[in-house]
Image (cartoon, grey):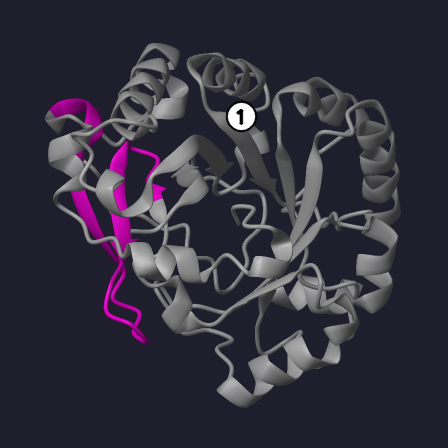
Amino acid sequence: MHTKTTLVINWHLTEACNYSCQYCYAKWDAAPSPRELINDLEQTEALLLELYHFFQPGNLANPLWDQMRWTSVRLNLAGGEPLLHHRRLPHVIRKASRIGFEVSLITNASRLTEKMVAELAPDLVWLGISLDSANDETNRKIGRISGRGALLDVEALAGALDGARAKHPHMKVKINTVVNELNQAEDLSPLITRIVPQKWKILRMLPVVTGALAITDQAFNAFVTRHQRFAGIICAEDNQEMRDSYLMVDPNGRFFQNGQQGTSEGYIYSRPILEAGAAEAFAGISFDPDQFFARYPEQLGGDAK
């Protein structure tokens, strides 16, 4: 039996995004209802309650309990780009927190203003920022640019994070970097030094939906080695480590998992959670507790990624 402090559920609440990254995995098959749940607050709250009821610590009916014995549950909100729903998002985060979740958010930060950070920070335990390059041309080629041609202002982002963490020191910051063909040779040390995250997740481009910009084992390992000065905060994930190791919910409220390893076969889905109930829906997908725990390096004190 494993013991772990935090169980993490990743809700990808929207497929919409203002960027068009070539390797984006946030492409889901249409569900019976094409309307994303985030557009209906009543349905959103029902989903949050159903997830917490099923995954709350001590639920003996949850098939993972005997193997994992978590003491808290974190809801990680991702996309697409969650801040495209900036009017609903603060309510959703507060509601999730009041239900009992710890809450974290992953964003490309393109719409993360100082005002927005200040509004969200009180209810967040982690704020994740997706940053793949410090080079404007590389970001353009990847697709990390808005339809209006706007690139992320990293210095403005760093300033907003500095202010938020000064007022809300409980909120930790992590950086997510997808290593791909276009940024594999880059040195992101100056960027990481400026942001000063508590965690840096380095992921190898995963060919679930597309094989665009895929890289070799050697290229991925070289990127990680190049940044060993940050070894104390790095969490590196190769493709095999991502399979069946995440608890994921799609924008229409279905559990899902990656398809066949090393291919671009898309995803495997459960029935809609609000239709079948979390227990029955969860039984329809695979999840490997050993893979889940393998993503938690001891030097990070067991904090959830």
Element marked by disc 1 = helix
Q: Residue at x 37, y 72 (%)?
A: 240
Residue receiving disc 1: 85
Residues 48 and 125: in front is: 125
| Residue 167 drawn at (x, y percent) | 83, 23
Q: Is 133 rendered above or below residue 43?
A: below
Q: Is residue 106 left or right of residue 7?
A: right
Q: Is residue 118 left or right of residue 3?
A: right
Q: In the rendered image, is residue 184 in sight?
A: no
Q: Is residue 173 magenta?
A: no
Q: Residue at x 60, y 41 (%)?
A: 107
Q: Residue at x 55, y 89 (%)?
A: 218
Q: Residue at x 61, y 65 (%)?
A: 142
Q: Amino acid at mark 1?
A: His
Looking at the rendering, the stretch of residues picked out in magenta corresponds to 248-275
Q: Is residue 62 left or right of residue 252?
A: left
